[in-house]
């Protein structure tokens, strides 16, 4: 029996997850496949209902733009998913679909791998979608004060308000206030799709951010991983700033998802090699 895992995304063509999980399945000797499904928002409920009825369904990852919308389509949420208010992993359990969020642990692990340590200043987070929720929650757990900015100021304010019961040190600002927020920041994180190949703005900088306003020791992290050097990371490199692309987080959150689906320890080195991380 071949088990089936999926990525629910829109668009889905840019994803490296099939390659990464395919390598993991091979090393683990699992008879399983992983397919990236391009699911328009109007079809999300239909697709999730189909997964619930599939006896060979192993699990799914969920990414832009579905991490928030999928919440109401699932039977149960883990503590992490409830706290963040977003789901990136779906696990079948006894005919029920459980929503979890491995982005929190994946993001924290990627920062640790890059040598980032809390205590050196605040973070600036760009975006207010599902990935931004997880990043904001992770930074709060690490004790890093975080300024959240979004194209729509009300979206940033809503993110901060939603996380306030479980996360301290978050502040929402309008995009016009970004220059002030960047001064003294130890970390800049892009959690939008701006700069993503195949996305709506592949050649632009998120919120038109000026990385030249960051102090010399700042780390610039773009969760986008295709291309690996986004316009934001290219601008940061040109300024001599340290950079972190999205591949380490992709691998770490994927490994955490694999543990939930199979109960097995993921082959991290094979997963990293498969995506060039």
Image: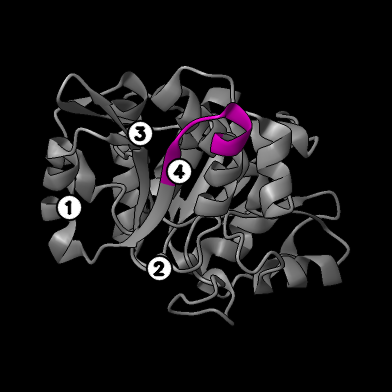
Mark 4: secondary structure: strand
Residue 139 seen from this side:
no
The residue beneath circle 3 is: 84
Mark 1: secondary structure: helix
- Magenta residues span 25-33
Q: Gap between marks 3 and 4, in whole Å? A: 16 Å
Residue 11 seen from this side:
yes
Numbered disc in front, either 2 or 1: 1
The residue beneath circle 4 is: 171
Question: Local crowd at mark 3 within 10 Å, few (<14), some, or many (≥20)?
Answer: many
Sequence-wise first label, 1 or 3: 1
Residue 18 is situated, as x and y percent measured from the top left of the image, at 50, 52
Residue 203 versus residue 46 in the image, above or below: below
Relative horizontal placement of residue 163, taking residue 108 as reference (left or right): left
Q: Gap between marks 2 and 4, in whole Å? A: 15 Å
The residue beneath circle 1 is: 47
Toward the viewer: 61 or 207? 61
The N terminus: image quadrant: top left
Sequence-wise first label, 2 or 4: 2
Residue 66 is situated, as x and y percent measured from the top left of the image, at 28, 53
Residue 129 is situated, as x and y percent measured from the top left of the image, at 36, 53
Question: Going 65% across and 57% down the picture, which residue do you hit?
Answer: 182
């Amino acid at each position: 029996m071949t088990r089936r895992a999926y990525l629910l995304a829109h668009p889905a063509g840019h994803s490296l997850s099939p390659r990464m999980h395919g390598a993991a399945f091979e090393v683990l000797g699992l008879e399983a496949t992983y397919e990236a499904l391009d699911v328009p928002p109007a079809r999300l409920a239909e697709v999730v209902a189909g997964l619930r009825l599939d006896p060979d369904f192993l699990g799914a990852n969920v990414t832009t733009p579905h991490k928030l919308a999928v919440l109401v389509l699932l039977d149960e949420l883990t503590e992490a998913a409830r706290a963040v208010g977003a789901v990136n992993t779906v696990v079948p359990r006894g005919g029920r679909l459980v929503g979890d969020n491995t982005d929190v642990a994946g993001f924290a692990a990627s920062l640790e791998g890059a040598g980032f340590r809390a205590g050196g200043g605040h973070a600036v987070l760009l975006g207010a979608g599902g990935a931004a929720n997880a990043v904001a929650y992770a930074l709060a757990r690490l004790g890093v004060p975080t300024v959240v900015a979004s194209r729509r100021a009300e979206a940033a304010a809503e993110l901060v308000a939603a996380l306030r019961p479980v996360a301290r040190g978050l502040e929402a600002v309008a995009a016009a206030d970004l220059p002030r927020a960047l001064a003294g920041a130890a970390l800049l994180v892009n959690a939008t799709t701006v700069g993503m190949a195949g996305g709506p703005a592949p050649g632009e900088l998120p919120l038109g951010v000026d990385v030249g306003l960051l102090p010399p020791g700042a780390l610039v992290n773009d969760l986008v991983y295709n291309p690996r050097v986004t316009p934001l990371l290219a601008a940061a490199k040109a300024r001599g700033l340290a950079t972190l692309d999205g591949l380490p987080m992709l691998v770490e959150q994927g490994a955490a998802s694999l543990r939930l689906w199979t109960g097995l320890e993921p082959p991290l080195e094979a997963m990293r090699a498969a995506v060039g991380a």
